[in-house]
Amino acid sequence: MKRRTFDLILSGGGLMVAALLVALAFAVGTQYAFATNYVKEELSAQKITFATADKLTDGEKTWKAGSASLVTYAGQPLETGPQAEAYAKYYIAYHMDTAAKAAGFDGATYATLGGIRTSLAADVTAAKAKGDTAAAADAQKKLDAATSLRTTMQTGETLRGLLLTVYGFSVLGDMAGLASNLLYGLAAIMFALAAAGFVHAFVTPKEKAVFTPAREPVRAASAA
């Protein structure tokens, strides 16, 4: 095979691969753009704004290591995935935790409060059956507190779940953006290699061959 032909075949193939990479990069890039715009539109529609730094309590700032993000985003409208994660994990979760402590059910969640309410309701019924009005009133007070807290937990956990879902969607979008940039980079490399191949093909002498088996030297016939 002629070396020029070989170079043209390889360069043409490289050019096709580069074009395919560009197409893939564009397709993935559109997904990144969609995810970014979707996240911003959905979060902006909630009209959530982080509390300004002077309005944040010491507890809100120091509850967990990540709580410092509330200071970072202080006063900003909630429009991005990382902001949604910070608001859900360190603002809403903090207030849910403090609400549970204030109600006397430290560490309780929406799920665990269901069993607590059932137990307290049974205590109320048992106290009334015994005619113990003081115990019945005490149990009823705890039951009311658990019921109110469970409603708060349901609202908080629902919003937390929605925000964290949007955050997860934004992470996928960021990964798509990274993949798109990587594909564009690979396409640029393939274009450069293909161009170099074409140049090499036309500067190579037409008669030069490649993969041609070497010929064995002809041996002289031995004398009789």
Image: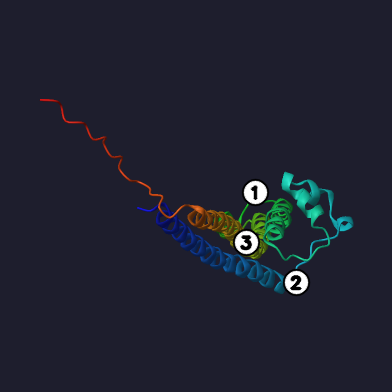
Q: Is residue 47 visible?
A: yes
Q: Residue at x 62, y 61 (%)?
A: 170
**Residue 170, label in figure:** 3
Tag 3 and tag 1, C-beta contact below 8 Å: no
Q: Residue furthest front?
A: 224
Q: What's the mark number on residue 47?
A: 2
Labelled pair 1, 2 in contact (Cβ < 8 Å): no
- Type of amino acid under label 1: Gly
Q: Quadrant of the C terminus?
A: top left
Q: Is residue 168 above or below residue 216?
A: below
Closer to the N terminus: mark 3 or mark 1?
1
* Element at label 3: helix
Q: Amino acid at mark 3?
A: Ser
* Image location of residue 108, percent across then percent down: 63, 52
Mark 3 or 2, nearer chain start? 2
Q: Are there few (<14), some (14-19), or many (20+) residues within 10 Å of tag 2?
A: few
Q: Earlier in the sequence, mark 1 or mark 2?
A: 2
Residue in the image at 67% along x and 61% along y: 81
Residue tagged 1:
107
